[in-house]
C-alpha cells in the first residue's frame, strides 16, 4: 500500500504500524485507497480548514457517506479512532467499493472464522 501511495510512513525511513490513527489520517487513507475525487467544496466542519492537509479527504469521505462529523458541527480530525469506529467506517467503505464493482466477484465467499475477537479491548456490545 505504500508503493501505491495509500499509506505513508511517519517519515522517509520509518513506518509505525502500532501507532494509533486519527480521524484525519483514516479519512486520508480511505480517500486514497478508494480513489475518491475531491469536489473542491469544503466540508462544513468548524474544525477543518481549507488549508489543512486532510481537508480534501475529509470532504470526500463525508460526501460519499463513509465518515460523518459530530452533532456540534466538528469532524474531530485529531481525535484517535476507536476500534468500533474504524469497523463502522471500513464497512461503509467496503459497501461503497462493492457497489461500484457489483458483479465482479459475484458468488465469492470469505471465511471470517480465522479472526478472533479480542475481548479485552472491545466494548461489551461488540461481543454479542
Image: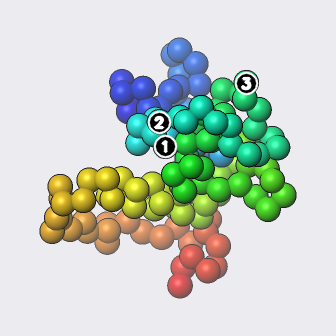
Mark 3 Cα-neighbour bin, 10 Å: few <14, some 14–19, many ≥20:
few
Whole-Å distance between the Cαs marked 1 and 3?
A: 20 Å
Question: Are the residues tagged 2 and 1 within 8 Å (C-beta)?
Answer: no
Element type at mark 1: helix
Q: Which of these two is toward me, 78 or 103? A: 103
How far separated are the C-alphas under marks 3 and 2?
Answer: 17 Å
Residue 29 picture location, percent across and down: 51, 38
Q: Position of residue 97 (x, y in %)?
A: 36, 53
Residue under numbered circle 2: 37
Quarter-of-image position of residue 6: top left
Q: Nearer the viewer, residue 60 or 89?
A: 60
N-term mark: 1 or 3: 1
Q: Residue at x 54, y 63 (%)?
A: 88
Which residue occupies 41% across, 37% down?
35
> What residue sits 52% from the left and 67% below the top?
118
The image quadrant that residue 49 belongs to is top right
Location of mark 1 (residue): 30
Nearer the observer, 2 or 66: 66
| Dot 2 or dot 1, earlier in sequence | 1
How far is disc 2 from disc 1 in space, using C-alphas? 11 Å
Cβ–Cβ under 8 Å for marks 3 and 2: no
Q: Looking at the image, is mark 3 or mark 2 earlier in the sequence?
A: 2
Q: Is residue 56 visible?
A: yes
Q: Which residue is mark 3?
A: 51
Amino acid at each position: 500500500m505504500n508503493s501505491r501511495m495509500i499509506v505513508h510512513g511517519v517519515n522517509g525511513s520509518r513506518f509505525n504500524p502500532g501507532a494509533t490513527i486519527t480521524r484525519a489520517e483514516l479519512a486520508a487513507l480511505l480517500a486514497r485507497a478508494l480513489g475518491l475525487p475531491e469536489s473542491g467544496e469544503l466540508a462544513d466542519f468548524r474544525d477543518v480548514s481549507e488549508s489543512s492537509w486532510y481537508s480534501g479527504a475529509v470532504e470526500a469521505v463525508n460526501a460519499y457517506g463513509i465518515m460523518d462529523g459530530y452533532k456540534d458541527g466538528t469532524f474531530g480530525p485529531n481525535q484517535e479512532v476507536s476500534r468500533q469506529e474504524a469497523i463502522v467506517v471500513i464497512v461503509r467503505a467496503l459497501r461503497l467499493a462493492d457497489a461500484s464493482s457489483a458483479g465482479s466477484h459475484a458468488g465469492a465467499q470469505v471465511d471470517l472464522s480465522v479472526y478472533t475477537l479480542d475481548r479485552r479491548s472491545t466494548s461489551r456490545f461488540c461481543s454479542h
